[in-house]
Amino acid sequence: MVDEGTVSNQSETLPVHPAVKPISFLLGIWRGEGEGFFPTISSFNYSEELQFSHSPNKPVIAYSQKTWNLKSGQPMHSESGYWRPKLDGTIEVVIAQSTGLVEVQKGTYDMEEGVVKLSSELVGNASKVKEITRVFKVENCKLSYVVEMATSLIGLQPHLRASLKKL
Ligand code: HEM
């Protein structure tokens, strides 16, 4: 953050909407690596880029994610969506995944802790997935997250863990 009400976003300094300001710790481009697992699959490793960006004075953050197989560099999962924080500390997120699955997530953020916690209110167009939770934490220019999912066979369990650094 450069001064009251603005944030450095790539090379520009843009006025930030008051609703976005408390979670402006997310804004920027993040790169890192993650690990995927679930009781029914073989574990795997991936590299990842996340981008959180905003338009001047709009109460919304645009989100995009891309992943690659860590060994081969082949593209894996990708997703994008919109994060809509409210001044009362709640947040609503919509995400469309490259697999066709869509999510409506609701949750809370904690500006002091740099934490956002999300839990699915709706998972659509999914053959197996019943529920998804996501927890993000930003600390010392490092973003880490855990994604858990429940399927028709398995209760809520971690599927992804990753750690990324701000570019
Ligand atoms: C497997 C969902 C994100 C890579 C699966 C399965 C589901 C799933 C339902 C099958 C589990 C089963 O058969 O019991 C999701 C959801 C995601 C997500 C809801 C996001 C919220 C990702 C990401 C990657 C990924 C980011 C890659 C970086 C894989 C792989 C498998 C898998 C490699 C195993 C496929 C196989 O063995 O056939 N995922 N996934 N997933 N997922 Fe994800």
Image (tube, helix red, strand yellow):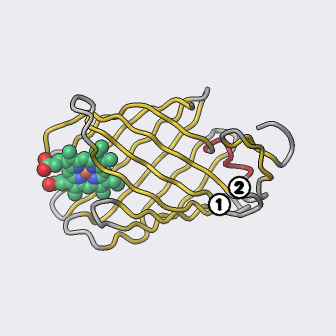
Q: Is residue 53 above or below residue 34?
A: below
Q: Is residue 35 above or below residue 52?
A: above
At 58% across and 36% down in the image, what residue appears?
138
Report helix, strand or loop for mark 1: strand
* Residue for badge 2: 20
At 69% across and 40% down in the image, what residue appears?
112
Q: Is residue 58 left or right of residue 123?
A: right
* Residue for badge 1: 85
Residue type (three-letter) at the residue carrying disc 2: Val
Residue type (three-letter) at the residue carrying disc 1: Pro
Image spot of residue 162 (x, y percent): 39, 35
Asked if the residue at tag 1 contacts the one at tag 2, i.e. Cβ–Cβ closer than 8 Å, the answer is yes
Quadrant of the rendered structure where residue 151 is? bottom left
Q: Is residue 6 above or below residue 30?
A: below
Cβ of mark 1 under 8 A from ligand 1: no
Category of crowding for the residue at label 2, using alpha-carbon neighbours closer than 10 angstroms: few (below 14), some (14–19), many (at least 20)? many
At 61% across and 63% down in the image, what residue appears?
84
Residue 7 visible in this rendered orientation of the protein: yes
At 40% across and 71% down in the image, what residue appears?
122
Image spot of residue 71 (x, y percent): 23, 28
Cβ of mark 2 under 8 A from ligand 1: no
Q: Quadrant of the N terminus?
A: top right
Category of crowding for the residue at label 1, using alpha-carbon neighbours closer than 10 angstroms: few (below 14), some (14–19), many (at least 20)? many
Q: Quadrant of the C terminus?
A: top right
Quadrant of the rendered structure where residue 19 is? bottom right
Q: Which mark is residue 42?
A: none
Image spot of residue 82 (x, y percent): 54, 62
